[in-house]
Image (cartoon, helix red, strand yellow):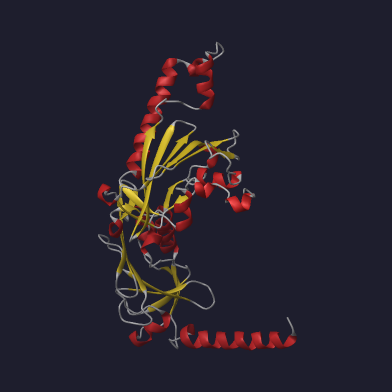
Amino acid sequence: MNAKKLIILGVGTVLALMLALVLVGRPDPSPTLADDTALLPGLADGINDVDALEIVAPDGETVATLHRERERWRMREMHDYEADFARIHDLLRDLARATRLEGRTDRADWYGRLGVADPGSGEGSGVVIRFPGSQLPGLIVGERDPAGIGRYVRLAEETRAWLTDQDIDLPVERIEWLERAIMDIPVEDIESVTVRHGDGDEVDLRPADEAGGTWVMLDAPPGREVEPAWQLRQTANALARLNMTGVRPHDPGLVPEDAVETVFATRDGMVFTAISFSDESGSWVHFRVGLDERGRGGDAQSADAESGSADADASDSPAATGAERTAREIDVVAVDGRLSPWQFALAGERFDRLRPTTEYLLVAPEESGSP
């Protein structure tokens, strides 16, 4: 970078800082020092009693109505689907720690400069958090201060705006308040994948090694070359770190006849059936979870049972096997109970990985050198 560019950047930085000071620096000529008074007195002591939150966007629209039910947070605007516990936890923690570092302005016509004007009042409106059923006051959260200390805030019942020492994060996209993780089953735990299309096309994939690093396609068309193993592995790994982009209650009437069925069998005997389809509102998948028909408890146990090994220890006894099967059945019921009531929207690439066709997994004839 030459000297001329450095000078231009330096002048730009000074101008930006001056502009920031004009807009949000000290709108009140005599700010009030608060001596680290808690922003929301009483929250730290009663944080475990908070069981409802309401988030309102700057335009006045309610983003999220959150309520706690049996130690889980849920979101009313998204059919009472599970909310992001970590986000709510972090928000309440930051609010409980937040202090009133410095008073700013109590002039309503200056609220917009700090982003703490009432929602729906136009430019400079803030995001509101309320605590329904609680004595805690609502809070309007505005802009970050230029020094990066925290955010400007205003209690809904007060006229004075404050600078707080916490960077309070209040997203205004509904999806940001949901628990977006559907499941996380790594490819190493998958024993087989079968994809069935409505036109009769069927794809069968199996691991070629114990680690699941290499996958093969069974019954490939004669004379056709299959895509590299890493590409097959993408489908086998489709349930790893699987996140949604939306959710709605499962309605069988929304599932078309040509929906694609993908069956993932795990090494511990669970079967995940994914029914995927698209409509005008997005790309969707519905999951059913069951137990492997063979009721296996893992590859090693199956091998001992099949070989009739005399060296099997007490853990391989019929009683132990029955207990393990019962435990797996309980797991299956729990997982199916969490997944099957819903249809999940997926991003394009993750959706496509669930439903490859045979042709998609074959090298094009001109690429393989076939006549």
Relative depth, front residue between 300 and 62: 300
**To which quarter of the image does residue 4 belong?**
bottom right
Q: Position of residue 43 (x, y in %)?
A: 36, 60
- Residue at 52% across / 45% down in the picture? 237
Residue 137 in sight here? no
Residue 313 vertical position relative to residue 290 in the rendered view, above or below: above
- Residue at 32% across / 52% down in the picture? 81
- Residue at 69% across / 88% down in the picture? 7
Q: Residue furthest top?
A: 310
How many numbered markers are drawn? 0
Residue 67 vertical position relative to residue 137 in the rendered view, above or below: above
Relative depth, front residue between 294 and 132: 294
Relative depth, front residue between 171 and 169: 171
Locate the N terminus by quadrant: bottom right
Residue 2 in sight here? yes
**To which quarter of the image does residue 28 belong?**
bottom left
Q: Residue furthest right?
A: 2
Q: Position of residue 187 (x, y in %)?
A: 53, 41
Q: Residue furthest front?
A: 371
Relative depth, front residue between 310 and 62: 310
Q: Position of residue 77 (x, y in %)?
A: 29, 60
Q: Position of residue 98 (x, y in %)?
A: 44, 66
